[in-house]
Image (cartoon, rainbow, N blue to C red):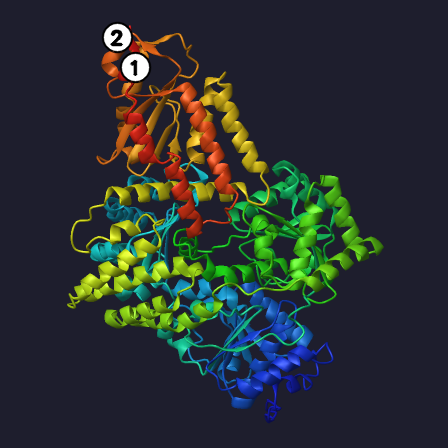
Amino acid sequence: MAFTTVTPKTAAPATPDLLFRELPRRKIPDVLPHQQSMMQRYAAEAEAESDVALQLPTGSGKTLVGLLIAEWRRRKNKEKVIYLCPTKQLVHQVVHQAERKYGLSVVGFTGSQRNYSPADMAKYNQIDCVAVTTYSSLFNTNPYFCDADVIIVDDAHAAENYVASLWTLNISRFNPSHIATFVSLVNIFRSHLDPISYSRLVGEAESSADHSWVDKLPTPVLYEIHDEICEVLDASAGNSDLQFAWKMLRGNLRSCHIYLTPREIFIRPLIAPTWTHAPFNNAKQRIYMSATLGAGGDLERLLGRKKIHRLPVPTGWDSQGVGRRFFMFPSMSLSFEESISLRRALISMTPRSLVLVPSDHMENEIAEDVNTNVSTHTVYSASDIEESKDEFVASTSSVAVVANRYDGIDFPGDECRLLFIEGLPRAVNPQERFLMTRMGANVLFNERIQTRIVQAIGRCTRSLEDYSAVVVTGEELPDYLADPRRRDYFHPELQAELWFGVEQSKDKTPSDFIENYSLFIENGDAWEQANQMIVDQRNVSIEKSFPCIDQLSISVKAEIEYQVAMWNQDYVDALSKAESVIGTLVAPELRGYRVLWEYLSGAAAQLAATEGNSSLLTKSKIHYSNAKAAAKGIPWLVRLSASTSDEIAKSDTDLQNEMVMLQVERIESLLESLGTTHERKYAKREEIILSGLIGKGDGDHFENAHKLLGEHLGFDTGKVESDASPDPWWQSGNICFVFEDHANAETSSSLDATKARQVASHPEWMKYNVERCKSAGVEILPILVSPVSSAFEGAAPHLGEVYLWKLPIFLSWATSAMATIRELRKDFVEPGDLAWRMRAGEVIQSKGLDAISLSNFFKANIARNLLQIK
């Protein structure tokens, strides 16, 4: 047997860009100037840094830069290097580019360790190649890649969920292996939740506001029931995939937070403790690559690093973008049904399309629609293109429908010219959603949200010569992109593209959209004129910086030090670091985030007190009180401002504030679901309510409108058709109004005993049939809505605790209430704006639309006192 030929290793060149010229299999002549500049800067100033971030915009070739740096370090320093991607599909894509385009030999590792090739493992361990693998291959309890010298994190902006998953318990109500755990924890939590929160958690609530609900188990409650939670998870987590995350959290549950949604119980620390994971923390260097790195410390928060050395975007990329996108916003002109028909028409006109959606359910729904209504096209899923997209690209009649993959999947050139984005969620996990919508900390996530959006819309524009149409639909994303108040924070090129797309989407028919798309794809003279409009707009657009970036950048070091101290159970030091954060976050726009840190300071002080430093209990109460004072719009903070050891007693003002803000939060959810860039959905709902009430010819229409009115005003509402059931009910906190709609009665008629007995019995029906009304603390008021002025003598005994809302007064009140919500909508932008919440709460109280004001009104209108008894 002949000996294997061994080639002596040669010295690496001075910088990574020079290495590219030594690769004989490369398909491109050389690196581009901006790539060369980035690699030379890295070699000159960042080679020895422990954490480095490289900013390279979408389509600028960051994969080549990352791979060349990896290969350069492997050759120069004899280092083990791993290149991390979010998904298996992206691993295959990077390996494919390295081998076929760049002439680099790398090895991809996906799937289970037991299936890794022995030859590939030997190459990596002998430092003969760079390994390309997924985040999950490193961030697990037993990683194969445990001793890498250099870790390159591609698409670093997408890393947080993959990284944090190692310390996250996501207990799903719908996962069969989680159900027993979910039920056991809910039983522990139940006595600490109000009836409405409990019904939402277990999926009994009905409205869209309930479906988007998220809350947090208050930290003092977590401390109180800590041992019970541990006992449940010790007993049940080992029988499911929860065992791995629970192993990481078991000794540090007090350093975590428990978030509640109708779908899951979500447990994790605020910041992922990556410093405790040796395979990541012990590397000589970690390199993070992203299209946008942010200046507010977001990358540090995502990855748990106190300081990251940044190499910013090369000169010239700050004004000109990559490729050309033509945005279409069908919902600005078309109905929901017309938008679906437009999607079908555009897909049928196009050889290959890509549809990005936020959920598996929507993926299945759209795939089924295409299969049924665009039978000429083949539907591909994410798994179909995971290893290779060659079959999809070779097709001339196909559409890829992909869920939860908004970045990384690239379709350059002619591979795909039509991209649909069906609703990009701003928050990708319950913690983010809680901080945005409940704490009002939207400013914290400005850069993160923008990065996700930029990545999503850039899937088909990967170079300067690329172009694609981007059709934006869904509930949140069209409003986000079309809002001129947000547009100024985007890159000038994108600002101009969005401006043009919005203007071309106003007052358009389906045929107008199709014609404009055809002109864009033809790329002829007509589009050249349109393109010049975009260029002219780009030249006068200026990208603004997000507010408070400097303060967020300064505070991040103390934020991570706080989490380190909490993880080490040094609660006194954690309190000190949290107070440092508070001292930094002084801008008014940061009030919501500052409230969070007042709350965390109170929790750290409380824990320190339980460990023996009892003097800090007073400090805990002060921080909780500060949190409440700064954000009266967050109901559960009221409970923490009382003594942390005494029974909590709310003042009447606190109780009213809490109940009003429950309404405001639900109004926020409703306004968001109806959209803010146009009022078509809002106006349609408003018309249904007002015509249903005022028309009052059909009892069913009146009752439905009555229920919708309650939703519109932020009440939790219900209506069922069953034996002896009431008409709609409205509830907020521990006050419930249950109605009997007697609107069709003649003004001259009298109320009979049967109707009186019926309405008087409604509270008992509610207690027996509605879970959230079974609590002893819920006050249920039966309300009769009727035009009558008299009652028969037999009705009188039943009317002493029934309240009358005379129909003309009710209709006048309803019309005024609808006008009030319309006024509030005018300056509503998104949920979580604490200043808007405060204004809305004040208006609702001043107009008497809140539960306590209504309760007082009803109690002054006892039916027996107002009706003439015959």
Q: Percent from the top left, x then y, of residue 805?
A: 36, 22
Identified by mark 1, the residue type is Ala
Give the quadrant of the C terminus. top left
**Is residue 300 toward the left or the right of residue 391 in the image?**
left
Would you say residue 430 is visible in this rendering? Answer: yes
The image quadrant of residue 167 is bottom left
Q: Earlier in the sequence, mark 1 or mark 2?
A: 1
Disc 2 marks which residue? 794
Q: Percent from the top left, x then y, of residue 456?
A: 59, 58
Considering the numbered disc 1 on the image, is that residue within a helix, a strand or a loop? helix
Q: Which mark is residue 772?
A: none
The image quadrant of residue 164 is bottom left
Identified by mark 2, the residue type is Gly
**Is residue 288 toward the left or the right of residue 710 in the image?**
right
Location of residue 622 with respect to 295 vertically, above or below: above
Query: Observer-nearest residue: 814 or 207?
Result: 814
**Is residue 384 toward the left or the right of residue 219 in the image?**
right
Q: Are marks 1 and 2 in contact (CB under 8 Å)?
A: yes
Report how far apart the C-alphas of labels 1 and 2 lie in the structure.
9 Å
Would you say residue 523 is visible in this rendering? Answer: no
Disc 1 marks which residue? 756
Location of residue 83 with respect to 372 vertically, above or below: below
